Image (cartoon, rainbow, N blue to C red):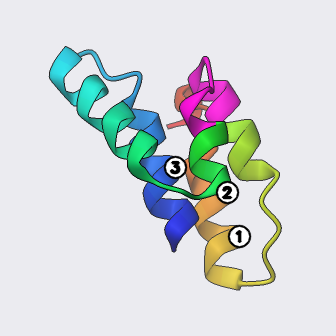
């Protein structure tokens, strides 16, 4: 669940609303998790997706979420 929350924050780093982008980056900086550090330095939404794709999990719900979260935005 931690990866889900951090990934959703990282996605907001690229929000058009500057305050939202700043707050999400601030929240990522506060997390001691290694994935938070990697998501913080992600330079694009695709980089965020790649970090999420690299997370290993045997949880079915996580795999389902990851498939939807990393879906190209043009596919929606």
Mark 1 neighbour density, 10 Å: few (under 14) some (14–19) many (20 or more): some
Instruction: Look at the image and give the residue range highlighted in magenta.
Output: 39-48
Disc 2 versus disc 3: nearer the observer = 3
Q: Is residue 68 above or below residue 25?
A: below
The local secondary structure at tag 3 comes to helix
Q: Is residue 62 left or right of residue 12?
A: right
How packed mark 3 is, by other alpha carbons closer than 10 Å (few <14, some 14-19, many 20 or more), is many
Residues tagged 2 and 1 counted as in contact (Cβ below 8 A): yes
Instruction: For marks 2 and 3, give the CA distance.
Output: 13 Å
**Residue 41 higher or lower than 32, as above or below:** above
Q: Nearer the viewer, mark 3 or mark 1?
A: 3
Image coordinates for residue 9, horizontal then vertical, percent: 40, 45
Q: Which residue is mark 1?
A: 63
| Residue corresponding to mark 3 | 7
Q: Position of residue 30 (x, y in %)?
A: 39, 48
Answer with left or right where residue 5 lies relative to residue 21.
right
Secondary structure of residue under mark 2: helix
Q: Quadrant of residue 59?
A: bottom right
Predominant secondary structure in magenta?
Answer: helix
């Amino acid at each position: 669940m931690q990866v889900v929350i951090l990934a959703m924050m990282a996605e907001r780093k690229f929000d058009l609303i500057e305050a939202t982008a700043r707050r999400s980056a601030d929240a990522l900086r506060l997390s001691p998790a290694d994935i938070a550090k990697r998501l913080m330095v992600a330079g694009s939404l695709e980089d965020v997706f790649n970090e999420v794709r690299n997370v290993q999990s045997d949880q079915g719900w996580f795999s389902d979420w990851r498939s939807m979260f990393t879906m190209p935005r043009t596919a929606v």
